[in-house]
Image (cartoon, helix red, strand yellow):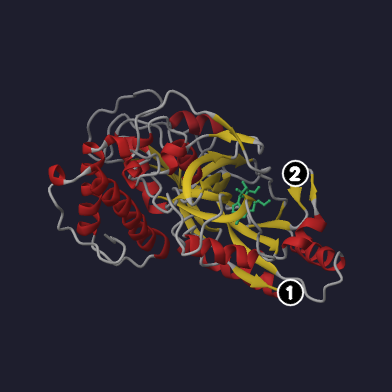
Amino acid sequence: MDFKHDPSTDFASVRALSKEDAKNEIEALREGIEYHNYLYYVKGEPRISDAVYDQLLGRLQELETAFPEFDSADSPTRRVGAEPSSKLERVQHHGPMLSLTATRDREEIADFVNRVGESTSAERVTFTTEPKFDGVSIEVVYENGRFKYGATRGDGMTGEDISDTLKTVRSVPLRLQGGNRPPALLAVRGEVFMLKQGFDELNTERMQKGQKPFANPRNATAGLIRQLDSKEAAGRPLDARFYDVLHMEGSLPECHVEVLEQFERWGLKTDTFNAECSSLQQIEERYDALVDQREKLDYEVDGLVIKVAHLQLRESLGVRQRSPRWALAWKFPPRQEVSRITDIVVQVGRTGKLTPVALLEPVDVGGVTISRASLHNEDEIHRKDVRVGDTVKVARAGDVIPEVQSRVAAPEDHREGAFKMPSTCPACGGEVSREGAYH
Ligand code: IVH
């Protein structure tokens, strides 16, 4: 039985199976399903239809129900979520989960590149550049190639066990791919994040249910990944990338580039934007390229991470105050600009909710022209004390609707009177009532 290469769905009756047969078929199905999962979610090159995939999964579920003695925590059937847990257990990381020194200053990038160059006698220093994913940092542990558990970063030394929700993320392998024997123990670090489109859908859904929308995809990811009921995370468009080894039994390659290549062979998803650079100019080109692509990517990135590629050189550069001296995050400019409110209009949502919206003198915020921004509700307007004619700070948090953040007191502003919600609906003329902070 080889469901990897011959995904036949011509199954024998479960009752006709001996224990031994069932065990073998279960194992072959798990191997096969995870392989096709890898082809689809990691490589983006599926070889079987969704219908066949569902049939394999259905068969596995059927066998696991009939033979509960072969139950396993890393079975692909766990990807739909598990029974809710009562709390998240704390786990100690296999190595400190360090943070990155960040800057927005080109000069500091040049200083970093020079400093690294001066610290070695090597003629050329290689760096890798990677997107800085705006998500939630995770540790995932594999034992003999099988998913053992996953954890949040927490305080860097210990985090929370989020295995159940992580298993619902299809690009987090439940078993590693590749012909070679996987290490007995492998702890990797990566990021889990939400796709922009799914984020918008999730928020629409939440608002329809009367729940508070998430401010940005990162908050949504953090909220879902820490759910005690992992079924809440299942089916959500969460994705992952891997970028570091926290611990590995056996020897590591010499260079981060090879580590990333090994990740790919294992089916640990790496980013297609990752590149090798060996000069400041090349690094700057990658930064500019990522700024250009930023809006087109289907997930949020908030900068470029520059890392020394050679692991030995990393070792000799060391760590300072929990940040490695061998890496630097080059953050993107803030997506906040100043503009003037020309009018405040009221928008009527599908659920009948009224949202005050500021019309603005058009302004470029992080590459996108903004001419309207949400003021959320009447209380917010009064709290921020913003009126027509005011100069205000406008920001895009995540990829949500831009918002007016605060008023910039400008003496030349001709301020109009304070805003008042209309008493009749601008869409249907009906009477407006208030529920909590909303009309
Ligand atoms: S490397 C010591 N690479 O940015 C090096 N971090 O403090 C460990 N992040 O929360 C970090 N994308 O989770 C690295 N390509 C990337 C990253 C990345 C996002 C996050 C990381 C951490 C924060 C930096």
Question: Mark 2 = which residue?
Answer: 322
Mark 2 residue's CB less than 8 Å from ligand 1: no
| N-term mark: 2 or 1 | 1
Question: x and y percent of residue 335 in the render?
Answer: 57, 53
- The spot of residue 219 in percent (x, y) is 49, 40
Residue 81, position as x, y percentages in the image: 34, 38
Q: Where, by quadrant of the figure, is residue 313 drawn?
A: bottom right
- What secondary structure is found at the residue carrying circle 2? loop
Q: Which mark is residue 94?
A: none
Would you identify the image quadrant in which residue 233 lies?
A: top left
Q: Confirm whether residue 214 shows in the render.
A: no
Q: Tag 1, which secondary structure?
A: loop
Q: Residue at x 34, y 47 (%)?
A: 76
Label 2, residues with CA under 10 Å away: few <14, some 14-19, many ≥20: some
Q: Nearer the viewer, residue 279 or 96?
A: 96
The relative height of residue 157 versus residue 294 in the rendered view (above or below) is above
- How far apart in space, not on screen, are marks 2 and 1 (Cα)? 26 Å
Q: Could you tell me the amino acid type at mark 2?
A: Arg
Residue at position x 67%, y 43% in the image: 95
**Is residue 230 visible in this depiction of the protein?**
yes
Q: Find out whether the residues at labels 2 and 1 contact each other: C-beta distance under 8 Å.
A: no
Q: Is mark 1 within 8 Å of ligand 1?
A: no
At x 69%, y 45%, the residue is: 98
- For image coordinates 22% across by 31% down, the residue present is 430
Disc ID at residue 279: 1
Label 1 environment density (alpha carbons within 10 Å; few <14, some 14–19, many ≥20): some
- Residue 136 is left or right of residue 358, and the answer is right
Q: Is residue 126 left or right of residue 122?
A: left
The amino acid beneath tag 1 is Ser
